[in-house]
C-alpha cells in the first residue's frame, strides 16, 4: 500500500498508538483495570453463592463473559501501550547516545550521587 492512503493510515495508527501509550500511563487506567478485575471476581463468587437463587444463571454468565472480555481488552491495550512507551524510550536513548558520540569533545555524565553514568 502506497500513496496518500498509506500515509493517512500510518498517521492514524501512530496517533492511536500515542493515545494508547498516554492512557496506559494514567492513573485512571490502573483503577479501571482494578475495578474490572474486582467485578469479574465478584461474578465468579456470585455464581457460587447464588446457585439456588431466583437470578438466572445465564445473567451471571453473561455478566462474567462481558467483564472478562472487557478485562482482556484492557490488559491487551495495556501491554500494547507499554511496548510503545518502551520503544519510545529506547529510541530516545539511542538518539542521546548518537548525539554524544558525534561530538568532538569528551563528555562525562554524572547522577546526583556523583556516579558516572555515561562517558
Image: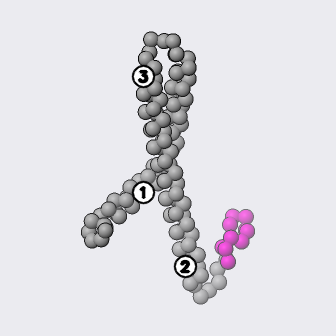
**In this picture, is 43 found above or below 28?**
above
Which label is found at residue 5? none
- Which residue appears at 56% of the width and 72% of the height? 94
Q: Nearer the viewer, mark 2 or mark 3?
A: 3
Where residue 2 appears, x then y in whole percent? 30, 71
**In this picture, is 115 found above or below 47?**
below
Q: Which residue is mark 3?
A: 59
Residue 96 is one of the magenta-drawn residues: no
For the question of whether residue 29 can be seen, the reply is no
Q: Residues within 10 Å of mark 3 (few under 14, many from 20)?
A: few
Q: Earlier in the sequence, mark 3 or mark 1?
A: 1
Locate the N terminus and report the quarter of the image it occupies: bottom left
Whether tag 3 and tag 1 are in contact, CB under 8 A, the answer is no
Which label is found at residue 99? 2
- Which residue appears at 48% of the width and 39% of the height? 71
Residue 33 or 40: which is nearer the viewer? 40
**Left or right of residue 97, residue 54 in this image:** left
Q: Residues within 10 Å of mark 1 (few under 14, many from 20)?
A: some
Where residue 80 appears, x then y in whole percent? 49, 53
For the question of whether residue 113 can be seen, the reply is yes
Disc 1 secondary structure class: helix
User: What whole-number distance in Å separates the C-alpha atoms at marks 3 and 1?
Assistant: 35 Å
**From which residue to which does the magenta span run?**
109-119
Q: Which residue is mark 1?
A: 17
User: What whole-number distance in Å separates the C-alpha atoms at marks 2 and 3?
Assistant: 60 Å
Amino acid at each position: 500500500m502506497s500513496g496518500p492512503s498509506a500515509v493517512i493510515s500510518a498517521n492514524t495508527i501512530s496517533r492511536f498508538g500515542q493515545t494508547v501509550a498516554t492512557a496506559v500511563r494514567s492513573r485512571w487506567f490502573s483503577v479501571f483495570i482494578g475495578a474490572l478485575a474486582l467485578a469479574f471476581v465478584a461474578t465468579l463468587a456470585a455464581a457460587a453463592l447464588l446457585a439456588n437463587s431466583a437470578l438466572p444463571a445465564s445473567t451471571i454468565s453473561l455478566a462474567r463473559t462481558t467483564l472478562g472480555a472487557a478485562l482482556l481488552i484492557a490488559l491487551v491495550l495495556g501491554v500494547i501501550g507499554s511496548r510503545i512507551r518502551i520503544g519510545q524510550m529506547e529510541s530516545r536513548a539511542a538518539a542521546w547516545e548518537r548525539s554524544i558520540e558525534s561530538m568532538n569533545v569528551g563528555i562525562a555524565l554524572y547522577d546526583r550521587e556523583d556516579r558516572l553514568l555515561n562517558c
